Amino acid sequence: MIRVLVAEDQSMVRGALRALLELEADITVVAEVGRGDEVLAAAREHTPDVALLDIEMPGQDGIDAARELAAELPGVRAVVLTTFGRPGFLRRAMEVGAAGFLVKDAPVAELAKAIRAVVAGERVIDRDLAAAALAIGATPLSTREADVLREAADGATVADIARRLFLSEGTVRNYLSSAIGKTGARTRVEAARVAADKGWL
């Protein structure tokens, strides 16, 4: 029996995933959590074979949860599920050791097949996203440029960003200017949106 942990912040979606997966004769859901920062503790307690991780959850996103699992419980295979078909998210998920990356509108039979495949040691990736990720390439943003864009996304001022990231205001302006140029945007808020849409943040 394949043991699965479901991490999804929407309780209705979480319940639906559980109900659908438990229709499979060889799959059982051993734990459910609604926050990304609850994944590691639940995995330690329930020892799943596979963790299905929503990409956007409170507390911690699914990619960071996958990173923690890969570092601390490498026997748990992480499969990231998303409603956002963004190639950058796929690339980030693979970089942290996720075994799979699927969009949520995939049929449940495909999800069950993916779970069996990752337990067998395979990697399972949505084909359309894989092609798009290859076409786009890696993020052009440096780590610091991505940091300042995340802070700028909600309209934070240069002074606010500098204070939060312990940088000088001049350094923040330089990073923002560079990031705006790399994204082809006109403003820092637009640059943050473009980068988020591509999965670079």
Image: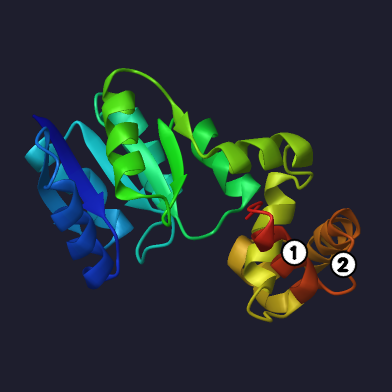
The residue located at (77%, 42%) in the rendering is 136
**Residue beneath label 2, please?**
185
| Quarter occupied by residue 184 | bottom right
Q: Position of residue 180 (x, y in %)?
A: 86, 62
> What amino acid does circle 1 point to?
Val
Reading the image, the residue beneath label 1 is: 194
Could you tell whether 139 is left or right of 10 in the image?
A: right
- Who comes first in sequence, dot 1 or dot 2? 2
Q: Quadrant of residue 139?
A: top right
- In the image, residue 122 sits, relative to residue 195, either above or below, namely above
Marks 1 and 2: CB-CB under 8 Å?
Answer: yes
11, 149: nearer the viewer? 11
Q: Is residue 173 visible?
A: yes
Q: Is residue 128 left or right of residue 175?
A: left
User: Residue at 90% of width from left, 72% of height from top?
Assistant: 186
Nearest the camera: 52 or 102? 102
- The percent coordinates of residue 22 (x first, y second) are 11, 47
According to the image, what is the colour scheme of the structure? rainbow
Which residue shows up at 40% across the image and 45% down it?
80
- Tell me if residue 125 comes above or below residue 120 in the rendering: below
